Amino acid sequence: MRRTKGEELNEKVVVPKDYRYGTNRPWTIAAKRLNPPGKRRRKVFVEPIAPEDWTVLRGDTVEILAGKDKGKQGKVVQVFRHRNWVILQGLNTHYRYIGKTHDYPGTYIASEAPILLRDVALIDPSDRKPTEVEWKFTEEGDKVRVSVRTGCIIPKPVVERRDGIVPEQWKDGPKDTSPEDTVEKTFTPSLKTLEEEVMEKLGIQENRRQRKSYWY
Amino acid sequence: MPTISTVGTQRNNKDCDSFTRRRRRRRRKMAASSMAGRVLTLCKQFQNVFRISSGINAKNAAVNLAKHYSHLYSPISSVSQYRTLHTTISRRGLDEFFDFPENWGEETVKSGAPWSAKHLRTKSNEDLHKLWYVLLKEKNMLLTLEQESKRQRVPMPSPERLRKVERSLIRLETVAKERETTLRLLQTGQEKGRPGAWRRNVLGYIYWYRFKEYAIPWYMNTRYMRKRFYTPKFVEPHIRLRIEKYLRDKYRKTNLKKRTLAKLKERFPHMKVPSS
C-alpha cells in the first residue's frame, strides 16, 4: 500500500555508517536532498569527546575565540554532538536569499553557520571572561561545571521545554494524579505473584486443574 | 481415535542411516516403556474426553466470574496520572470510549507526564492491576478519537497523550515482569519462565530453543519428529570456513579502529583517548 506523507515522515530513518551529518536532521526533506542514499562523501574527522565531558549546553552564553565574530558573546541555540558543532544566535552569520520564485528575488536573511566546540568557550559568571570548564562534584553530590581559572560554579541554563510547560506553574487536570498519590508507597514485598495477590483481593477461586500438556 | 499401534510401526520402519541413528540413541531411554506408554495413552484419551465436558462447565464458570469481577472492580482512590476518581461506574460502558464532553471539539487537551518506572515500583500489585485497566481504557478512548479524526480529516487534538499512555503501559509491564522474575529467581533459581534448551541446528549453530506447548507428547508429534537438532557430517567444513570468516571480520574491525584512532591522534594531538 502507498505510504502517506505523514507515515513517510514518521518512519525511522536508517543512516549509513559513513553518513555525513549536517545542520539538517536526517529525516527532513532537506537532508534527504543533500544526502540521497548511495551518496558517499569524503570522511570528516571529528574529535571524540565523551558524553560526560561535554560542557556546553543549549541556552548557555559562550564567547567565540576564533573566526569572523571573534570576541563576541552569544547564546547557544543548537548543539550538534556528532560534528562537535554549536550554533549561536545571530553570530557567525552569512547572508542568503530564501523563498525565491520565478519573479520574486527572495527574502534576504542572515543564517548562522555552525562553530566548532574548540573555537568556543564558556563564560565565567563572576568576571564575564572566557574560561576552561571541568565537571566536578559538590559536597552534596551534584555534578556541576566549575571554571578552572577562578573556581566559580557555572549554573545550568534554564531551557524552555518543547511543549511549553513550566513545571512550577503546572496545575493538575481532571485526569492527572496528585503528586502525593503518585509518591505514596503502597508496595509491600511478599512471596505472592501479582496474579495470586489480585485473585486473593478479588475473591477469585481457581478450582480448575490444568489439562496435561507437553513442553518440548 | 488414536493410532498408537501405527506410530510404533512407523518408528521401527525408519531408515537406519547415520542421520536417524543419533536421534534414536537419544530417544532410546524414552522408548523403554513404550508398551506401558501405549496403554497409558489409551486411558488418557478417555480421560481427555471427560475433561472436555468439564471444560465447558469451567467456561461458564469463567463467565460468571467475569461478571463478579466487574462488580468488584470498585472505583479507586489513588489512581493513575491519567484518570481521576469517579464516584459511579458507568454501567452503559460506551461513554468510556469518549473523552469528557467539555473536551469535545478542542484543539489541544492538557495532559500530564506519563508514569515513570520509579513511581510504578512503589505501588502494590493490586494498584498496578487497576492502573493497567485504567490506562487501557484511556488508550481505547484515544484510539477511537484518532480514528474518528482520521475519518473527519481533522488533526487529532494532542496526539502525544496516546504515546504517553503507551509508554506508561510498557513501563508497567516491565515492572510486573521484574517482580515476577525476582520471585522466580528466589524460589527456583531460574530466570526464564518459559522452558527451553540449548540445541544445535542443521547449520551448526547452537541456539536457545524455546519449548512450545503441545497436547501430545513428542514421540507422537510427526512434524516435531521431522525436525533435525543435529548437524550432518558434510556441514562441518562449512562451519570451519564460517569461523575463519568471522575471525577475519573481527580482525578487520579492530585494525580499522586502530587506524582511525591513529589518524585522529595525528589531527587532534590534544584529544583524550576514548576508554571503550
Image (cartoon, rainbow, N blue to C red):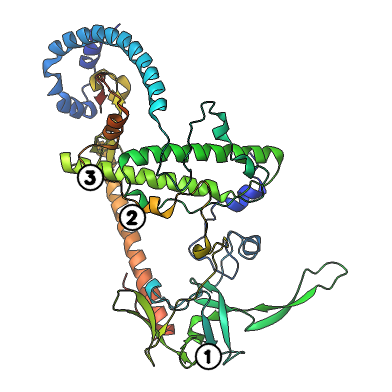
Q: Which residue is mark 2?
A: B245
Circle 1 chain: A
Label 3: how many residues lie within 10 Å, few (<14), some (14-19) or many (20+)?
few
Above or below — where is A113 with respect to B128? below
Residue A43 lies left or right of residue B58; in this view the side is right
How far apart, in angstroms, are the residues tagged by discs 3 and 1?
A: 58 Å
Quarter holding residue B211: top left
Image quarter of the N terminus of chain B: top left
Where's residue B179, x and y in %? Answer: 27, 44
Label 1: how many residues lie within 10 Å, few (<14), some (14-19) or many (20+)?
some
Q: Which residue is mark 1?
A: A65
In this view, the mark in front (3 or 1)? 3
How far apart, in angstroms, are the residues tagged by discs 2 and 3?
A: 51 Å
The dot on residue A189 is 3
Circle 2 chain: B
Tell me whether marks 3 and 1 sit on the same chain. yes
Q: Amino acid at mark 3?
A: Pro
Q: Amino acid at mark 2?
A: Lys
Where's residue B54, x and y in %? Answer: 30, 10
In this view, the mark in front (2 or 1)? 1
Circle 3 chain: A
Where's residue B51, x and y in %? Answer: 28, 11
Image quarter of the C terminus of chain B: bottom left
